[in-house]
Amino acid sequence: MIKVSPSVLASDFSCLSEEIKKIDNAGGDYIHLDVMDGVFVPNITFGAPVIKSLRKHSTSVFDVHLMIVDPKRYIKDFVDAGADIITFHYESCDNHDEVIDLIHSFGKKASMSIKPNTSAEVLRPFIDKLEMVLIMTVEPGYGGQKFIDKTLDSIKAVREMITETGKDIELEVDGGIYAENVHLPINAGADVIVAGSAFFKSDDPEKTIKALRGL
């Protein structure tokens, strides 16, 4: 079944605890937490202390997406804050194996992400070590952008890589995804859908979750 990971980036930051409960109540599978440092991407969101404060309000999987430079420095902080899956960007560092190994050393799932203009081939040397791959279908940094169609090629390419490994590796997509176009990444091979605006601007979040699963 397709999983849905609503992105807190599109929520009302003045009542975050209530917003993540909305995800749980609507049947969301994961809670997607976008961490931006204002360096790797041109925006700043929140860090480990905010995630730690939210951890006590939900038992759902915390799907933490690090859009920060030199992520290895902060892995322990996000583990301690309650992250279950930690995604870092291929473009953010040159010590990829070290970051993956560090995430695993804490018993957490490791995920690597690429931007829309980065070739999916860069993931091939690491795919066997990952529990998830995240394909950005917009330029990272801001919510509410339009889905970039050419990223479907990357989704298809990574799905083939995953199939070749024979392992249970999730393929997540993030950016510009709504009920109206979710069939595109799903048909290309995605099995985890990140949605921010589509979920938090919905009048019926539970119905939106079902729609994002392609139901």
Image (cartoon, helix red, strand yellow):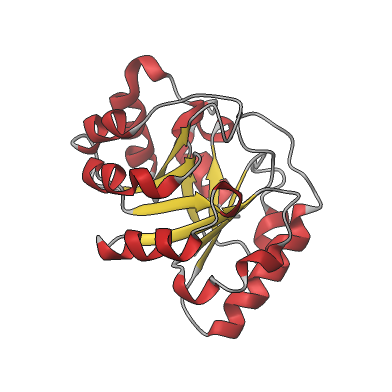
Q: Going by the image, does 149 lie left or right of 64?
A: right
Taking depth in this image into account, of 172 and 18 the one nearest to the observer is 172
- Observer-nearest of 63 and 107: 107
| Residue at horizontal 68 percent and vertical 56 percent from the top | 185
- Is 149 situated left or right of 120 in this image? right
- In the rendered image, residue 103, in percent from the top left (x then y), is placed at 34, 59
In the picture, the quarter occupied by the C terminus is bottom right
98, 144: nearer the viewer: 98
| Quarter of the rendering containing residue 133 | bottom right
Can residue 203 be spotted in the picture?
A: no
The percent coordinates of residue 182 (x first, y second) are: 66, 50
- Residue 35 appears at what percent x and percent y? 45, 35
Q: Is residue 13 above or below residue 120?
A: above
Residue appearing at x 54%, y 25% in the figure: 201
In front of the other: 24 or 185: 185
Q: Tell me, yes or no, if residue 102 can be seen here.
A: yes
Q: Please tell me which residue is depicted at 54% across the width and 72% down the height of the picture.
A: 127
- Give the residue at x 65% y 29%: 144
